[in-house]
Amino acid sequence: MRWFAGKHRTIVRLQPADTIEVSAAGGCLVLLGVHYADGAPERYLIAQLSGREPEPEDHFWGALLAALADGPVDGTAGRLELSPGAAFEVLARDLTREYVPATDQSNTLVALGESLLVKAYRRLESGLHPEVEVLQALEGTDAPVPAFAGAIRHVDSAGRRTAIALLQQFVPDAESGWEAPIERAAACLRRGVVDEGAVAEYRHAGVVAARLHAALAVTFGTRPADAADGRRWLGTALADLEDAAALDPAADRAAPRVRAALEPLGHAPETPLTRIHGDLHHAQMLRSGGRVLVVDFEGDPTRPLAARRTLDTPLRDLACLLRSVDHIGSAAARRAGRNPEAWVAAATRAVHAGYADAGPVAIEPALLEALELAKECRELVYAHRVLPEWAYAPRLGLQRLLDRAARSRA
């Protein structure tokens, strides 16, 4: 269960925080408190029908939305409320048909009809949710995102509000995820020719990232980074490096070189800051009929909710996108049995070119390099703790980054 963050901790008690009956569907939503032997408890959202998770034919989420459209639904220790967006009435025309458009996700995705997507958050935290906040703020802009249709929130007996689900436009037949890009890259490696067409989607990805950042800068405003931002960035990156080195021998060996290359994070005054996506990899882009939309604005799920709402440099998103391109190359190389260096270099240049054409901030090479290294360390930690079989990709990416830095300084 990728969505269960506490798998490395010892559970001592499970305690429902609230139970909300969905009578029309014959089931309920449970906000389940998970208490551990160490550290703070966590809360998870569990949908239940006769002791099991709802299937699409159960019409669970459509029934819940229909009930909420008439007003709040009370639970044993709180209530659920619907906060509709401007597009809700248009997109929620058919609540009687639902299906699951994707599996193996960190959250529950359910499509209602052909136009509305319910994204139910499995791990819950009280407070303003970054994804709901950002997509609501981008309503009416030309940002490359699906239309915002609203949110479902839980309000407990003390008045604390928690987003339990995002409602947004569903894009049927859109390509997303890792599989298709990896297979296209593998096909390119098998042909042995890396031309402009083979990496055109990555130039487009750079353009889309730039358009998103431009919209975020207008919507949320900007401010220059200061010394406190630099200290925080560097401190976080060094802590992630320490964790990565403790988990991965290759990272441990590379730690002195990585530590030196992270130093620019602590010296980035005047770099423009705004709200960012926070986890902008290539698989977060829906590709449909030549149109690309960015999804999943939760930010880094391993960070506290409040930390994901702070202003940051858009170059952090660009670094994340570039790391995902490198990971696609590593995965494709395993399938094709070929060296991916030329493909990775060409796709990386394509992202740079696309972003530079429309980006609201200039690309600062030393800062971007440091942000890429910081991201790769965090990817290694995530892989070892959640997806060990994926650790090879950030490990290879870390080495490529260091090799590239060495060549540029030679």
Image: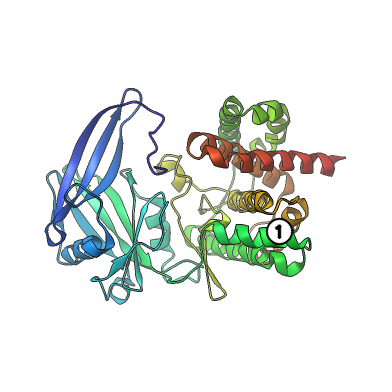
Q: Is residue 379 above or below residue 255?
A: below
Q: Position of residue 61 (x, y in %)?
A: 24, 61
* Residue 173 is at least partly visible in this image: yes
The amino acid type found where label 1 is placed reads: Ala
How many tags in the picture?
1
Q: Is residue 381 above or below residue 352?
A: above
Q: Nearer the viewer, residue 211 or 229?
A: 211
Asked where in the image residue 167 lies, by quadrant, the reply is bottom left
Quadrant where the N terminus sits is: top left
Q: In the image, what residue occupies the spot 39% across and 33% down?
A: 7
Query: What residue did someone put label 1 on?
Result: 347
Task: State left or right for residue 185 relative to residue 89.
Answer: right
Q: Nearer the viewer, residue 290 or 188?
A: 188
Q: Position of residue 134 (x, y in %)?
A: 43, 58
Q: Is residue 183 above or below residue 96?
A: above
Q: In the image, what residue occupies the spot 27% across and 76% down?
A: 93
Task: State left or right for residue 88 relative to residue 323.
Answer: left
- Looking at the image, the residue that sits furthest to the right is 410
Q: Nearer the viewer, residue 286 or 81?
A: 286
Q: In the image, what residue occupies the spot 61% across and 51% down?
A: 324
Q: Position of residue 179 (x, y in %)?
A: 55, 58
Q: Mark 1 packing: few (<14 Cα in 10 Å), some, or many (20+)?
A: many
Q: Secondary structure at mark 1?
A: helix
Task: State left or right for residue 362 relative to residue 280.
Answer: right
Asked where in the image residue 213 lies, by quadrant, the reply is bottom right
Quadrant where the C terminus sits is: top right
Q: Nearer the viewer, residue 189 or 22?
A: 189
